[in-house]
Image (spheres, helix red, strand yellow):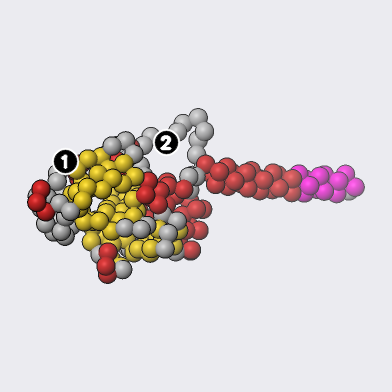
């Protein structure tokens, strides 16, 4: 009888130790996953969740509600629904986003369902996820689209004339006007990193 009690106690201790070990593995996995996440990728995922539903994000002192429909390496595109002054279709610079508000319950569920990354096999990026903001702006420039370009301290209307490695040149002209030499007020050089978003105005 004593031996049976001893074995039962040992079995119980072993079960407890296995439980503790599994809990430690789960905590380590959670810490590993958190350490692997990067800001831009996390924000892109939050804004893309439930695409038809607008999300609130802050860029400095500015706040936007945006329903995202597409994304790339460091940008998302979609329709701004508020504030009224900025309503329209935009290309949003993810590097400029300070905060994103998400549904707490949904985010917990999503976090619980995230698979642990395999350190030996990095996930392959889709073609869209490799396209940078600079490439998108070059395409807008090539198509001669009329845009509103927003930085933390300025709102410029015009046409993007040139896109360099880390800057662009915008020819300022009237809202909804085509670029004509006589209508250009200024040519402004803007660092890409200072751009919050670009709104397509035509």
Position in image of residue 163 (x %, y %): 25, 39
Residue to which mark 1 is pinned: 142
Q: Which of the image's four quarters has the C terminus?
A: bottom left
Residue 126 visible, this orientation: no
Please tell me whether mark 1 or mark 2 is closer to you in this view: 1
Residue lying at the far right of the rendered structure: 2
Crowd band around label 2 with a 10 angstrom C-alpha radius: few (<14), some (14–19), many (20+): few
Please determine whether, in this image, residue 17 is positioned above or below residue 196. above
Displayed quadrant of residue 3: top right
Magenta stretch bounds: 2-14
Residue 2 visible, this orientation: yes
Position in image of residue 90 (x %, y %): 26, 55
Please determine whether, in this image, residue 57 is positioned above or below residue 132. below
Dominant secondary structure, magenta: helix
Let me know if residue 48 is in the magenta part.
Answer: no
Q: Residue at x 50, y 39 (%)?
A: 117
Let me know if residue 7 is in the magenta part.
Answer: yes
Instruction: Identify the mark nearer the N-term, 1 or 2.
Output: 2
Residue to which mark 2 is pinned: 123
Please determine whether, in this image, residue 122 is positioned above or below residue 97. above
- Element marked by disc 2: loop
CA distance separating discs 1 and 2: 32 Å
Task: Work out whether residue 101 or residue 195 is closer to the camera in this orientation and state it.
Answer: 195
Position in image of residue 16 (x %, y %): 74, 49
């Amino acid at each position: 009888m004593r031996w049976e009690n001893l074995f039962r106690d040992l079995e119980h201790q072993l079960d407890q130790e296995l439980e503790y070990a599994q809990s430690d593995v789960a905590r380590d996995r959670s810490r590993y996953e958190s350490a692997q996440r990067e800001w831009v990728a996390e924000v892109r995922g939050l804004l893309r969740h439930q695409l038809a539903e607008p999300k609130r994000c802050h860029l400095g002192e500015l706040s936007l509600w945006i329903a995202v429909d597409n994304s790339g390496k460091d940008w998302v595109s979609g329709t701004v629904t508020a504030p009224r002054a900025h309503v329209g279709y935009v290309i949003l610079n993810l590097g400029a986003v300070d905060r994103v508000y998400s549904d707490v319950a949904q985010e917990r569920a999503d976090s619980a369902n995230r698979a642990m990354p395999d350190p030996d096999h990095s996930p392959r990026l889709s073609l869209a996820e490799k396209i940078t903001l600079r490439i998108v702006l070059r395409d807008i420039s090539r198509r001669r689209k009329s845009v509103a370009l927003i930085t933390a301290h300025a709102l410029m209307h015009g046409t993007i004339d040139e896109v360099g490695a880390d800057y662009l040149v915008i020819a300022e002209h009237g809202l909804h006007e085509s670029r004509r030499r006589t209508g250009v007020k200024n040519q402004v050089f803007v660092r890409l990193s200072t751009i919050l978003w670009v709104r397509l105005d035509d």
